Amino acid sequence: MRPKRLSVSQARRVALGAQGFAAAAPAGRVDRRHLQRLMGRLRVLQIDSINVVVRSHYLPVFSRLGAYERDLIDREAYRRRTLFEYWAHEASLVPVALHPLLRWRMARGEAWGRMARMADEKPGYVQAVLDEVTDRGPIAASELSEPGVRRGPWWGWGDGKATMEWLFWTGQVAVAERRNFERRYDLPERVLPPEVLALPTPPVEEAHRRLLAQAAAAIGVGTAADLADYFRIRVPEARPRLAELVEAGELVPAEVEGWERPAYLHVHARLPRRIDGCALLSPFDSLVFERSRTERLFGFRLRLEVYVPSAQRVHGYYVLPLLLGERLMGRVDVKADRRRRVLLVPGAFAEPDADSRELVGPLVGELVRLAGWLGLDDIEVGERGDLAGGLRECLGGGGRCL
């Protein structure tokens, strides 16, 4: 089969269409049907603990559907059980129908760090934790009888947390709920719908094939590495499955202008004539979380600077890319000051090939929408970046709004 040739602009529009940016946001109230349709496209909402603006998994829905009640996602995940948490990309919320396709990862138990060592080093303790979940679940790691002592910030987990995460990775426990973002674990049969648990577990090769097909539908077009990354399948394992999907007619070989490696196009991928609209994106949005693909598609180098010393940051602590039309045109450093009910914008930057005068108006609109959704009353703009002055002027000189 001859590869289908795409310009980089066409590839961008295919990708944006697949990710839900070609459709208009709902005119009325966003409800669970809208969320279910969107999750049918994205399959993955990556979770991250950073809460500078809002938890990251809430932002992709806002970027595509507009303002919605944030507990809509929580209700679907922890009450209705249409979504569940697992290591699908990174820690993610995914539709429960994907549970059988991820059991190969649970069975392999290829976790990292202290999680992976607990079963070998302290098998008795691991069994005791599982027994306690059985008796007391749902339960947080901090509520265990012997939770252990934290060994430092960030990933310096105590034995209890490391063990809970090992049991979670291997599918022996599931996340029943979150309180103040802390996971509370229980047995899968008390969390997941019985009809999902009753589904047969496919062979690894079939699971990979189906996950790669869903990844292709979600991103529209990508290289083997791009498709494998969506559900974190190893590229050497993905390549033969991709060939089988081409043979089955589910994927079409493609060549994208400027890409060194061959690509694959989902057979049902659409090429929108144009992409309109404007959106601020989480740095963990599935449109951009594969950084090399983001650079190839948009010419946009996205790096998270949270862990970079402040003096060495280029754009800021927590920076949201600005999507305008089919291009990533700017970056905005934002923070929600919840005590003062203010959206802080320490810096705002246009991309080198963008006209900053054309960005200010759309960006103001997005910041106003974001502030309103978060329940913040004002916007304050700092001094950093070539868009900052225009934002302050547009917002009334003092950089305040609403």
Image: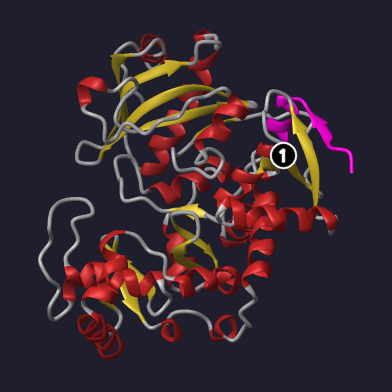
Establish if 53 lies above or below 251.
Answer: above
Query: Which residue ends up furthest to the bottom in the rendered image?
Result: 135
Judging depth in this view, the residue of 159 and 26 nearest the camera is 159
Residue 51 visible here:
yes
Residue shown at the point (48%, 60%) measured from the top left:
93
Residue 27 visible here:
no
Q: Which residues are magenta?
A: 1-14
Residue 49 image point, x, y percent: 31, 51
Judging depth in this view, the residue of 126 and 357 nearest the camera is 126
Kind of residue indicated by mark 1? Ala
Judging depth in this view, the residue of 305 and 96 nearest the camera is 305
Q: Is residue 3 magenta?
A: yes
Q: Is residue 130 magenta?
A: no
Is 214 on the left-hand or right-hand side of 388? right
Total marks placed: 1
Judging depth in this view, the residue of 340 and 129 nearest the camera is 129
Residue shown at the point (65%, 45%) measured from the top left:
224
Is 282 on the left-hand or right-hand side of 275? left
Is 276 on the left-hand or right-hand side of 158? right
Residue 241 image point, x, y percent: 70, 58
Residue shown at the point (55%, 83%) measured from the top left:
197
Residue shown at the point (53%, 43%) measured from the top left:
66
Establish if 56 lies above or below 312.
Answer: below
* Residue beneath disc 1: 263
Q: Quadrant of the N terminus?
A: top right
Query: Which residue ends up furthest to the left in the rendered image?
Result: 149
Residue 192 image point, x, y percent: 48, 79
Disc 1 secondary structure class: strand
Q: Quadrant of residue 381?
A: top left
